[in-house]
Image: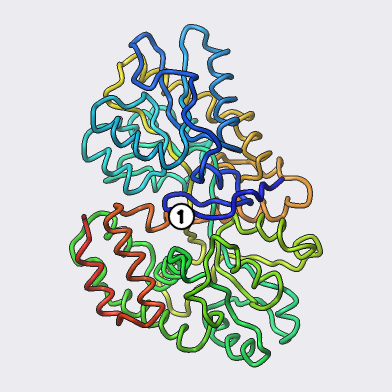
Amino acid sequence: MFNSNISRRNFMGLTAGAAGAAALAACGSSGPSDKGSSSGGSGSGSASYWSLSGEPGEPIRQAAIDRFNKANPDTKITPTFFQNDAYKQKIKTAIGAGQAPTLIWGWGGGGLKSYVDANQVVDLTDWLGQNAAVKDKILPSSFGAGTVNGKVYALPVETVQPIVLYYNKKAFAKIGANPPQSYGDILDLIPKFNAKGIAPFSLAGQSRWTNMMWLEFMLDRQAGSEVFDNVFAGKAGSWSDPQVLEMLTKVQDLVKQKAFINGFSSITADSNADQALLYTGKAAMMVHGSWSYGIQKADGGSFVKDGGLGWMNFPPIDGGKGDPSNTVGNPGQYLSISSKASAADQETAKKFFSTTLVDDDEKAGWVKSGGVPVLKNSDSLFTGDDAQFLKDMSAIASGAKTFAQSWDQALSPTAAETLLDNIAKLFQLQVTPQQWVDNMNGVIGK
């Protein structure tokens, strides 16, 4: 079920085997398609649609378009598919020039906010209110990254990819312990694993975004989702919340206590070396995305097949304010409608939203690719060896009171780069928690 050919996460998207949308933000396998127009619709009820090329996403998107066009012969959606990096540049240029396609594919978060600030995308809030049946088919937790200033500007589509805590069952058996049910349990486990020559956690620290996953969970469990919501909203000084300093101190304490594999700052995620440390038993646990399952299944020999891999949501911090059901990662991919498109073309796009993109074929297509759809009630489609993992990922995504988008996706590129740089310095003990806060406050809203 899982495609293991792509095994890295690039800046905006998370790639690798386990989730169907893993390849969506990865490098596509071909350039722009000649299948359609690269500009807005003509006003006749047609709609142009730009998105990403490559497996598994492109054929699933094309199938949806084909279904819609067959059912609606008087209108037409025409796609153009681009490789990932080319798409980012072309869509930015097209939107800036007022030549956006009718349907704009994206990751939500900071990119979407820039479109909203420039009045380039349609506010879907009232439309969703009038089409409650459509909204009710989609996981509520997926709407956050498509929402700006309390209004929905992008429909969640395709798949969800939560980040989870993986563990090696044999490593736990060696120290006679159970998986952690609280952060206090994690602290208790660190010296026990180190005493046995097993690293408590694998971490590909050179890649920076892998460290970020720790901060995302630690801040949520420590302070709840409100602090980062304030950062995303551009509220000055948001990082100065005392809970942030508490969280950053806890992270540096983990480094000092040797919670992470020796030399973690020189390990890269692109090489999947962090994955190998877990399935070979050199590390006991790893915080990583749902796409990691497919990598371990493909590269770990019989590790997954023999039941050696366990997984769970990140445990609560003792006394923390965060809801333990919350998760972080990719709550979906997103489609917006260009505000420059004609009224007829916008109506075609909305019909596409309310019919094809929430139908059973759409749901089945993403499940077949190895993904957990943003659409509700997909569990009956999870079959075979991977069924339990997919069911559990679906349960985490659907049960989350808050499904926070990965910080580097939620923030602007400028703020995201500063974030990743300072996270790396934090883990390498090159900045103090207060210096980290000061540095990040300096790029809020930029």
Q: Which residue is mark 1?
A: 403
The picture quadrant where one finds residue 57 is top right
Quarter occupied by residue 176: bottom right
The amino acid on which the numbered mark 1 sits, given as a three-letter code, is Phe
339, 183: nearer the viewer: 339
Query: In the image, is residue 330 above or below residue 100?
Result: below
Quarter of the image where one finds residue 167? bottom right
Q: Position of residue 77 (x, y in %)?
A: 46, 18
Q: Position of residue 421 (x, y in %)?
A: 34, 67
Position of 425 with respect to 327 (left or right) is left
Residue pictured at 42% horizontal, 75% vertical: 320
Instruction: Give whichever of 32, 175 is nearer the camera.
Output: 32
Q: Where is residue 12 shown, x and y percent of the image?
A: 42, 50
Vertical side of 241 occupied by 20: above or below: above
Locate the N terminus by quadrant. Answer: top right
Residue 98 in the image: x percent, y percent? 24, 26
Whether residue 2 is situated above or below residue 273 in the rendered picture = above
- Specify whether 118 is left or right of 167: left
Q: Secondary structure at mark 1?
A: strand
